[in-house]
Amino acid sequence: MDVIDIHASCDGDFIAAVEAESGQQIAECYQCGNCTAGCPFTFAFDIPVSQVMRLLQAGQKKRLLTCKSIWLCATCESCTTRCPNNIDVARIMDVLRHMARREGYASERGVKIFWDAFLDSVEKHGRSFELGILTTYIAKTGRFWPDMGLGPKILPKGKLGFRPHEIQGQKQIARIFDKFRQEQRS
Ligand code: SF4
Ligand code: SF4
């Protein structure tokens, strides 16, 4: 078990920034573990979500902004739903992702590339186009063979469309992305 010297490494400004951006009170978490128990990605996280909350209370900025968990989180909101203190944990994970990007902690490879490819796809088509995301991901990472084994599993289930599905609200969704960029610039 790692021992953290809180006096030496607690970044109070970081805690305040996450609280301001998420609208959540970090100190309200009493470490019951309900969020981790319900998180479908605990098996893949390097830091379980309840420990993310604990490290946040301890102001461990670098450790949190460089962890894999914030990128593997699927924003399913199970943690938020299960929290007995009504903490919007999923919102906190989202804020940590944004901070990691803004402050240059996010790796340019791996999950960040997948995340960007997903958002580009939603902006362009109004929803995700899996084959397009996969193609972009492989082109940018060079990761081809590690994912090949998934093809035979998902193709028969119709999970990998060969053409994007267009949706009715496509232009409105593109406008949301435009608005976000305008607000980022202002
Ligand atoms: S929102 Fe993220 S952290 Fe919370 S339960 Fe879902 S995958 Fe886990
Ligand atoms: S469910 Fe809520 S109170 Fe319990 S550990 Fe998670 S964030 Fe903390």
Image: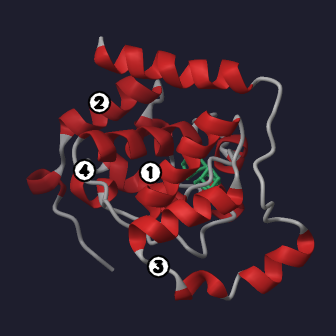
Q: CA distance from mark 3 to mark 4?
A: 30 Å
3 on left or right of 18: left
Q: CA distance from mark 2 to mark 4?
A: 11 Å
Sooner in the amino-acid sequence: mark 1 or mark 2? 2
Q: Look at mark 4 in the image and give the residue it sits on.
A: 61
**Mark 4 residue type:** Lys
Name the element at disc 3. Answer: loop
Sooner in the amino-acid sequence: mark 2 or mark 3? 2
Q: CA distance from mark 4 to mark 1?
A: 12 Å
Mark 3 sits near ligand 1, with its Cβ under 8 Å away: no
Q: Look at mark 2 in the image and give the residue it sits on.
A: 17
Name the element at disc 2. Answer: helix
Q: CA distance from mark 2 to mark 3?
A: 35 Å
Against 144, residue 158 (above or below) is above
**Mark 1 residue type:** Met
Against 143, residue 58 (above or below) is above
